[in-house]
Amino acid sequence: MRTRAAVAVRAGAPLELMDVEIGGPRAGEVMVELKATGICHTDEFTLSGADPEGLFPAILGHEGAGVVVELGEGVTSLAAGDHVIPLYTPECRQCEYCLHPKTNLCQSIRETQGRGVMPDGTSRFSTLDGDPILHYMGCSTFARHTVLPEIALAKIRPDAPFASVCYIGCGVTTGIGAVINTAKVEIGSRAVVFGLGGIGLNVIQGLRLAGADQIVGVDLNEDKRAMAERFGMTDFVNPSEVDGDLVPYLVNLTKGGADYTFDATGNVEVMRAALECAHKGWGESIVIGVAPAGAEISTRPFQLVTGRSWRGTAFGGARGRTDVPRIVDWYMDGKIEIDPMITHTLRHEDINEGFDLLRAGKSIRSVVVY
Ligand code: NAD
Ligand code: DAO
Ligand code: ZN
């Protein structure tokens, strides 16, 4: 059938809105009609050409919510009409990784997902002339319809509003999950969060939920301060206004170093500062940001010898089919907030405006409503 999609034709060019062909779901697959999608920094990272694994032409987008419209052979856990959130980190519940308690990185479709195709090695998308268009992060939520493996869909309650809960498909889960699943922050902790964008604000919201006493936010953009305070930030630091080195300033502010620090910028210099302002003896630093191709992190090994640890997290350590429906419940029960972070709502044909707002630092989340 035909659907409408914003296609990334090549790196560095605006998305092009066009009609495309989409094939029906094959065995183990599900077709979803998207109702809303967020625009995350990672979509911009790929579109810009900075992503070493970026492939074109492709249909980007990985932060969606929608309704199941058609099932492929053998699909048992979903039915037409179910409300779902696509998962770029699937949960097969069978592979070595899913069965290991220490990771959420299901590997069952990793290889084909990385090549922009479905598990059978083919794409469901093509131009009207029949040229293939690739999938992105297994989701491709910038199209009105998409096809995903059953294991890459979380079924959610039907009363949750699509335009809000789509953000749980990446930003909300990544930020809150980094605190709860990865760092396992304890009540009374001191924390520093670098980068107060769509991910960093959710780290702050997760820290408040976990009962942290001090939540320091660090951002070069002064405009991010008010929203971060609203979500629980206790101290704001703009590095460009600090006299001298940032690390000793933060160590002093946190009375000897933070119990937990988080990078939500993707900048490797920031990652180093985040590690080094963690408390001697026990401080943990969590890398969330995705750095440009070829970038490397460094520090003096003595920072680790003296008890700091460096860790990373993907999708907040969440197991999507299990955890995403619970996070939707938290939102519906008022335990977490999402709506104030959705600063812009756009029509599909205006999707490039969402990228402009992100690049200019003027939005937290732009959501396209179909
Ligand atoms: P964003 O653009 O909304 O926010 C980034 C923030 O960092 C901005 O407020 C910016 O002003 C600030 N910043 C930039 N350079 C800085 C510096 N040197 N010092 C202090 N602040 C600085 O982006 P986002 O959507 O919040 O994504 C943040 C990062 O997380 C990106 O690298 C993205 O690719 C990554 N990400 C990772 C995962 C994961 O699972 N690990 C998931 C989603 C996004
Ligand atoms: O299993 O090897 C793997 C990769 C899993 C991909 C995890 C991606 C998380 C970081 C990218 C940011 C997503 C928005
Ligand atoms: Zn698995």
Image (cartoon, rainbow, N blue to C red):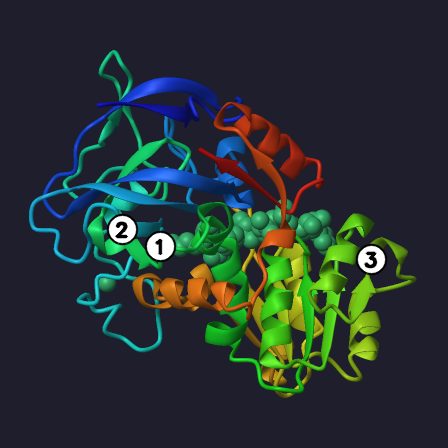
Point 80% across, 69% down: residue: 235
Q: Is residue 336 left or right of residue 7?
A: right
Quick check: marks 2 and 3 in contact, CB under 8 Å?
A: no
Point 25% across, 68% down: residue: 98
Q: Nearer the viewer, residue 242 or 294?
A: 242
Q: Quadrant of residue 272?
A: bottom right
Q: Identify whether 193 is placed above or below 301.
A: above
Q: Identify whether 89 is placed above or below 282.
A: above
Q: Residues within 10 Å of mark 1 (few under 14, many from 20)?
A: few
- Residue type at mark 3? Asn
- Find disc 1 in the rendering and name its residue: 158
Quick check: marks 2 and 1 in contact, CB under 8 Å?
A: yes
- Find disc 2 in the rendering and name its residue: 82
N-term mark: 2 or 1: 2
Q: Position of residue 64 (x, y in %)?
A: 41, 45
Quick check: marks 3 and 1 in contact, CB under 8 Å?
A: no
Q: Residues within 10 Å of mark 3 (few under 14, many from 20)?
A: some
- Determine the residue located farthest toward the left in the rendered image: 73
| The N terminus sits in image quarter | top left
Between label 2 and label 3, give the one nearer the viewer. Answer: 2
Checking the image for residue 238, the label placed there is 3
Q: Nearer the viewer, residue 240 or 235?
A: 235
- Residue type at mark 2? Asp
Point 78% across, 69% down: residue: 247
Q: CA distance from mark 2 to mark 1?
A: 7 Å
Q: CA distance from mark 2 to mark 3?
A: 45 Å
Q: Position of residue 143 (x, y in %)?
A: 37, 31
Q: Identify whether 23 is placed above or below 19.
A: below
N-term mark: 3 or 1: 1
